[in-house]
Amino acid sequence: MNPIPALLLVLALGGCATADHLAAPEAPDPGRLPSAQRVVSVPGLRPCNDGAGSMLNIDPRQAVNVLVHGCNGSAGKFLSLAEVLAFHGQQTVCFSYDDRASLMVSSGQLASAVDTLAESLEKPQVTVIGHSMGGLIARKALVGDRADPIRNAQIDLQLVTVSAPFSGIAAARGCAIPALRAASLGLNDLACWLVSGDNWYEITFASSFIRQPGSLARQVRRHLKVVTDERGTCRRRDETGQCIEGDYIFSLAEQRYPPVTNAPGTRDVEVPAGHVEIVGEAGVTPRKLIAVFQREGIVRVTPPERQSAFQDLLAQLYGR
């Protein structure tokens, strides 16, 4: 079994290459809501705008949403969700991390960032929203039985994950087969590392990262787990309507893992949508995800008198 084809597919997995490198839209910086009263610096957090600096402008009286992109997703349209939240008066910051680093390292950095951010909030309320591999990082950051858990006992946390492969990435299975690893005299492991980085084994079904997901910290009020049924989806079509690039990345089985799905406080919501479609990109508005978020109280309901303005914003952000 040749590990290279499987690992090349890992590069195309949601979050690893789900969106072309697009500059952030020319719209009000979502990290600078009109009510911002405090400027803070938090390692790992920045405004959700690729052209913005690292300083956060926040209103310490309001809740904060933290977006965690998938690997190589910093320029994806997932960041446009910050604008959707800002339109509804909700402030958002983005977590930046090295997508080739260990997932345990990245999740530890996120846990520390959330703890530090909470120090700047009068009544700390934080919702962490992760897409694809970012969902794995987000959940692991919020478990209580890790060596470096979130320590602020007063913080009110919510976790939201979208299309996250909690049972491991099937395309990377070859990286975890003992016989293959032994027969290749280390070349299999090297190939896996060259493609994926230090998290090459953590993303497999055999890793302790996957098999021992941990229990959410007591500060986590709930986990909204959005699962995408990506069968039959298409990202790009030619002039004749034929699909030339699919939007199927993770199966339902990859996204559902009983210790995570059945954990206390976890709500599983299934949505028929492609892996990129669910978070949106140029020409694809994430209406299904927005609908779920508004129904579940993550995004506030749009007032009737602002519906027209909201549709204009969506057209500006996604081009449709």
Image (cartoon, grey):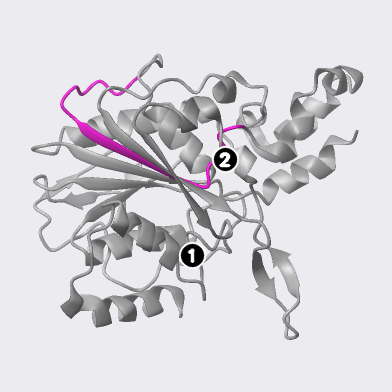
Q: The residue tagged with tag 1: helix, strand or loop?
A: loop
Q: Is 211 rendered above or below residue 233?
A: above
Q: Residue at x 48, y 33 (%)?
A: 261
Label 2, on which residue? 255
Q: The residue tagged with tag 2: helix, strand or loop?
A: helix
Residue 39 vs residue 245, the one in the foreground? 245
Q: Amino acid at mark 1?
A: Gly
**Which image quadrant is residue 151 in?**
top left
57 with respect to 43 (left or right)? left
Query: Callout 1: 10 Å neighbours few (<14), some, many (20+)?
Result: many
Label 1, on which residue? 280
162 with respect to 153 (left or right)? right
22 with respect to 92 (left or right)? right
The magenta region covers: 149-167
How many numbered discs?
A: 2
First along the sequence among labels 1 and 2? 2
- Which callout, 1 or 2, points to the residue nearer the camera? 2
Q: Which mark is residue 196?
A: none
The span from disc 1 to disc 2 (Cα, nearest Å) is: 19 Å
State the quadrant of the N terminus.
Answer: top right
Residue 304 image offset from top left, x and y in percent: 19, 76
126 with respect to 224 (left or right)? left
Residue 205 image offset from top left, x and y in percent: 66, 27
Q: Amino acid at mark 2?
A: Gln
Residue 161 image offset from top left, x and y in percent: 43, 43
State yes or no: residue 160 in magenta.
yes
